[in-house]
Image (cartoon, helix red, strand yellow):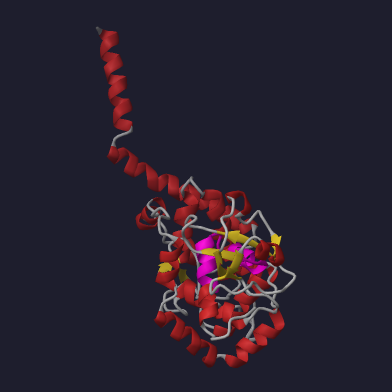
Amino acid sequence: MKKIGQLFLLIGCFILSFSPSAFSQEVPQDFAAWIELLREDARSAGISEKTLDAALADLEAPEPRVIELDQKQPEKTESLEAYVAARVSGKRIAEGRLMLQSYPTWLGRIERKYKVQRRFIVALWGIESSYGRHTGKYPVIPALVTLAYDTRRGDYFRKELLAALKILDAGHVSLARMKGSWAGAMGPFQFMPTSYQHYAVDADGDGRINIWGSVPDALASAANYLAKAGWKNDQTWGRPVKLTKKLDSSQTGLDIRLPLSRWQALGVRRSNGRALPRRNLKASLIIPDGPAEPSYLVYSNFRALRRWNRSNSFAVAVGTLADSYAENRGR
C-alpha cells in the first residue's frame, strides 16, 4: 500500500507540474531566457546595447494577437477574378492617376535610373498600401520577437528581427515610428526588414533610407527591387487573352514558355479578338480559375512581380492596375 501511495503522489506532482497555472508561470521565464540569447546574437551582429535596451527592455511575453493572426490566416479561396476586382477599383485607379501627376519629377528620375516603368511602381504602391494609407499599425520589433519566438517559422523571423534591429541601430527610423503589419512588413511598399537591407535606397540624399516618410526613398526602393528581380522596361507584364481553340492542360502554366507566334498558331488572341503582338517574346499561358475563366499570357515581368509576392493573383492585380492608368496600354 505504501508503494501505491507513493505512486499516486508522483502522479499528482506530475499533473500539477502541467497545470495551466504552472504553465503560465513557466512561459515568462522561458521567454526571458530566449530574449537573453537573442541579445547575445544581436551583440555579435554588431548591434549596440543602447538599441537593444530601447527595443527589448519592456518585452515580457509574446504578443497573443500576433500569434492569433499568424495561426488563423484565412485560406486563399478567393478566385483571381474576385481578387483583382476587389483591388482594382475605380477609386484606386483614380488615385493612382493622381499619384502619377503628383510626382512626375521623381518618378521620371527613378524610371530612368532603374529602367522600370512608373505605372508599375505606382500600381505596386496602390496594391500594397492604397498609396500609403494602410501601412500597418503594429510595432515591428514586438511583432517580430513574437514570431521569432514561435517555433513554426522561428528561423525565418529571427533573421527578419535581427535585420530590423540593425535598421534601428543605423538610425534610419525611430523605434516609435517603426510600425507595419503584424508580420513585420513596413512602409508603403510593405518591405520586410531583409528586403529593406537588400533593396532600399536613399533617393533624396538626406543620409537616411526612409521608406516610412520619404516618398522618393519608397518609390526608388520599389523600383530597385524590381530592377534586381530582372525587370525589362521594353515589355509589359502580360495581357488577358481569349482562346479560340481548346488547349491541353499540359500547355499551360509558368513552366511552359513559347514564342508569341506559337501561341498565335495555337489559337490564342487578345481579349478583344485581335491578333497577338508581332514581337519576339516568349510567354506562358495561365488559367488560374479553370478552363472557363479568364486566361492570361504573361511575360518575364510577371515573374519579377512574383518575386515580390509569389502569387499569380497579386501579379495580375498589379499589372491590371498599371494598365488601367493609361488609355493606351504598354506593349
Question: Percent x, y for residue 104?
Answer: 59, 92
Relative depth, front residue between 201 and 250: 250
Q: Quadrant of residue 78?
A: bottom left
Was residue 101 drawn as part of the magenta stretch in this picture?
no
Q: Quadrant of residue 25?
A: top left
Would residue 192 be found to the left or right of residue 72 on screen?
Answer: right
| Image: magenta residue range | 298-319
Image point (52%, 92%), residue name = 102
Image point (26%, 9%), residue name = 2
Question: Percent x, y for residue 60?
Answer: 39, 55
Would residue 117 be found to the left or right of residue 212 on screen?
Answer: right
Was residue 304 drawn as part of the magenta stretch in this picture?
yes
Would residue 306 be found to the left or right of residue 73 on screen?
Answer: right
Question: Percent x, y for residue 131?
Answer: 47, 80
Question: Percent x, y for residue 69?
Answer: 38, 56
Examine the residues drawn in magenta and state their main secondary structure.
helix
Q: Is residue 63 above or below residue 122?
A: above
Image point (69%, 77%), residue name = 233
Looking at the rendering, in which quadrant would you find the C terminus? bottom right
Relative depth, front residue between 206 and 12: 206
Visible residue check, residue 218: no
